[in-house]
Amino acid sequence: MTERIIKSHIADGGVGWSAIDEKEIEAVTRTLKMPDNLFRYNDETETQCMLLEKELSQKTGIKHSLFVASGTSALTLCLSAYGIGPGDEVIIPGYTFIATASAVTNAGAVPVIAEIDDSLSLDPSDAESKITPCTKALIAVHMQGVPGRIAALRSLADKYNLILIEDACQAVGSTYKGAHSGARSHAAAWSLNFYKIITCGEGGVFFCNDDDAFIRGVNAHDPGSPMWKSGLTRGSSLAPFTQLGVRGNEVCASIARVQLAKLDGILNKTRSLKKVFLSRLAKPVNYQLQHVDDPEGDCGISAALIVRDKETTRRMAEMLNEAGMDIGSAYNDGFPDRHIYAYWDSILNKQGATPLGYPWTDPSYKGSVEYSKEMCPKTLDLLARSLRLSIHLNLTEQNMIEFAEAINYVDARL
């Protein structure tokens, strides 16, 4: 019988919503008291969306930012901004929310699913093995706040002249080697969904440094952009085109501005908590820690233990639960999780919006991608052996110490 080690009270709550207070309410109230200015475009005054975009670029050091309806739409713009669409393949990891794959099909391209490695992000070597003449881009996904092997992926993108996109939807505010995620790649996306590090309920941000790519992203996000007095496409010689309708809105932008101002405080807290946790862990016996390429850039909202085999993972999870620590493996066969490719039925079955099976059957697509639930065995094995601890604002240093003590106790007795 395992001793119950977790003694302190653990408050419920996620990272994002627990940071909502009267400041957001006041911001929304001010916006609603200006009903004539509830549209994101206004040629006479700066709107909430415009102000947010300025603040986002100042914060990240990325030249262009565009506030849109969701993280999925932001990822779609990352692709459309670089002309990626029908006939093209985009390599994505097998561990990410289904929205990453959906963004690829939204753009008219075909997702190619690759393995993850012990970073729990895209495996550069497997990604390279998946490159074909149709490949135009790689999407690196920073799951649970941890940037992946970006240096290796940048080298791979340079070698094959590919676009590298950083999906930082679960890693808002993350950095890599001193720069915000995406600042040194072609494009990046944030999500401001309710479950993210900062939130406005629903929203996303498209980032890039390239002027022409940004204009194409603007055109893609709103077919009316060239006709509104927005200033977003002013001075551009690029021909406009129509694609999506995913404008950001003023109410959400007003919330996001307040949340953005809180981002550093949130990350300071979560990073500090994770450092306490890691500092109290004994030398592992039955597990290894998730590889983190740049610990300083990690958002600190999770910690993952990769256990030596599936049976030991099961036993470790059971004993930790008895100790008072609610934890389980990332992948349990039969339990649907849209963050794992094996449950992306619409992608695996090549189901588009019509019976024609677009984009896989587009005449311009000359590839031959095939999918199956077993196509990435390394990914499924790693996730089945990964125990992930979520770290949020309502936890304390004492909580983190007790989590580490529980893991040390169980690990020594397995």
Image (spheres, grey):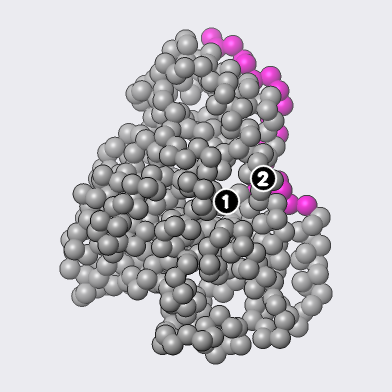
Q: Residue at x 65, y 41 (%)?
A: 268
Amino acid type indicated by mark 2:
Ile
The structure residue drawn at horizontal position 43% and vertical position 33%, both measured from the top left corner, is 290
- Inspect the image, locate mark 1, and give the three-letter code of the amino acid beneath it: Gly
- Label 1 Cα crowd, 10 Å radius (few <14 / some 14-19 / many 20+): many
The residue indicated by pointer 2 is 266
Q: In which quarter of the image is residue 286?
A: top left
Q: 243 or 79: which is nearer to us?
A: 79
Q: Which residue lies furthest to the front in this view?
A: 178
Question: Which label's residue is closer to the chain start, 1 or 2?
Answer: 1
Tell me the element at label 2.
helix
The residue positioned 51% from the left and 79% from the top of the image is 222
198 vs 216, left or right, is: right
Q: Does the magenta stretch include residue 19?
A: yes
Residue 176: image location, x then y, percent: 48, 47
Q: In the rendered image, which quarter is residue 133 located in?
A: bottom left
- Residue bearing mark 1: 173
Image-based side of 249 in relation to 319, left or right: right
Residue positioned 82% across, 74% down in the render: 33
